[in-house]
Amino acid sequence: MEIERSEAMESESEMISHKAYARIGLLGNPSDVYYGNTISLSLANFFAIVKLSPSDDLFIQPHPVHDFVHFSSLSHLVGRVNSEGYYGGVRLLMAICKVFFNYCKDNSIHLHHRNFTLSYDTNIPRQTGLSGSSAIVCAALNCFLDFYKVRDQIKVEVRPNLILAAEKELGIVAGLQDRVAQVYGGIVYMDFNEENMDKLGHGIYTPMDLSLLPPLHLIYAENPSDSGKVHSKVRQRWLDGDEFIVSSMREVANIAKEGKTALEEKDYSKLAALINRNFDLRRSMFGDEALGDLNIKMVETAREVGAASKFTGSGGAVVVFCPEGDSQAKLLEDECHKAGFVIQPVQLVPSMLNEIDLKTLQNGRD
C-alpha cells in the first residue's frame, strides 16, 4: 500500500496544469487581421484548464460534457448539436500536438520521447466571442513547454502564431489578437503593421499597466440564438481596395492608438467615446445582418443607460464602461436583467509570463 501511495504521489507531482483565460478585445478589433492596432485584456471570469500527466501511451481524454457522444434519443442528440455544435475540445488538443511537434522539428528543437495523457475543462461560455477555443489550445501549449522543457526555446512572441496555426488546421478563421492576450495575460497593446508582420511574422506587443483600466462590465446571452452571419464581404472588399472599408479599418486601428494614450492619461471620457466609435465603425462596415439582432441589442441596452459598449470579439458578448460610476452600473444591471442578459463585473488577470518567458522577450531584443 505504501508503494502504491508513493507512486500515486509521484505521479501527481509530475502532473502539469495550466490555465488560459477568456479575452476581451477592448479597442481596435477587428483591425488585427488588417495590419491594424488593438488593445486586449485577459478576463479572469472565465478560463480553460489543461492537465498533462505522464503515461505509457499518448491519450487525449474526451471531456464528459463537451465531447459527449452518448445520448438518450435522436431528439436529444439533435438538441445537443443545436445548442453546443458538433465539436468539443479533443480536436483542438490534437491540432496543437501536431503544430507543436512540427514547429519543434522544423526549428531543430529536441523533444524527449515520453508519452502523456491530456485532459481539459472550460467554463468559457460557447458562442460568446470570448475565445474559448484558443484558450484550450493556449493552455495545452503551456503544458507542452513545461513537459518538454522547451519554454526557453520558443519565444513568447511566436506562441500566438502556433495557437492560431492549430486553429487554422481546423478551419477556424481568426487573427492573432486573442492568442496574444491569452499568452501574455494582463492588458496588451498590439501593433500589427504590415512591415513587422512581413519581417518578423508577428506584431509588436506592449504590455500595459492594469491599474490604468477603469471598472468594466461584461454582458452576454446565456443561450445565444442569433450570432449573426459569419460570412461577410468586408475582407474581400478590403483586398479589392474599397475606399470606404480601407479608410474605416484604418480609423478602427487608430482608435487603439488613441485609446492607449487615453488610458495612460486616464482620460476616461475619451475612452468611452472611442469604445462607442469602435462599434459604430464595425456596424457601418459589416451591416446589421452580419452583426445579428441579439448582439446589437446587447450594445443598445448598455447605451440606453449612457454607458459605452462594443463587442468583445466578433459578437456574442459585449464589454461595457460606465463613465458615471456605480449608479450607472446599477441601472445597467437592471436593464440587462429585464432583457434576459447575463452581466458580470470584469475581473482582470495579471501577466501570465514567468521569468523564463521574460528572458525570451529580452533575448529577442538583443
Image: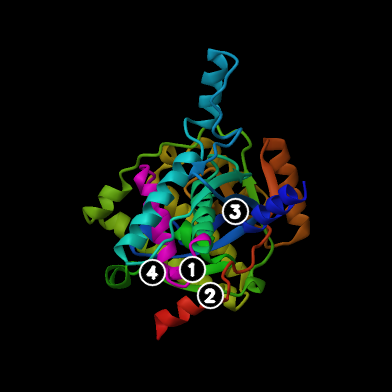
**Residue type beneath disc 4:** Gly
Q: Position of residue 251 (x, y in %)?
A: 39, 64
Location of mark 1 (residue):
151
Q: Which residues are magenta?
A: 147-175
Q: Position of residue 49 (x, y in %)?
A: 60, 50
Q: Position of residue 226 (x, y in %)?
A: 51, 33
The furthest residue to the left:
240
Q: Earlier in the sequence, mark 2 or mark 1?
A: 1
Crowd band around label 2 with a 10 angstrom C-alpha radius: few (<14), some (14–19), many (20+): some
Crowd band around label 3 with a 10 angstrom C-alpha radius: few (<14), some (14–19), many (20+): many
**Whether residue 284 can be seen here:** no
Dots 2, 1 in contact, CB < 8 A:
yes
Q: Earlier in the sequence, mark 4 or mark 1?
A: 1
Provide the secondary structure element on which disc 4 rests.
loop
What separation in Å lies between label 3 and label 2 (alpha carbons)? 33 Å
What separation in Å lies between label 2 and label 1 (alpha carbons)? 7 Å
Location of mark 2 (residue):
356
For residue 227: magenta? Answer: no
Rendered position, 355 above or below 340? below
Q: Nearer the viewer, mark 3 or mark 2?
A: 2
Q: Earlier in the sequence, mark 3 or mark 2?
A: 3
Location of mark 4 (residue):
203
Dots 3, 1 in contact, CB < 8 A:
no
**Residue type beneath disc 1:** Arg
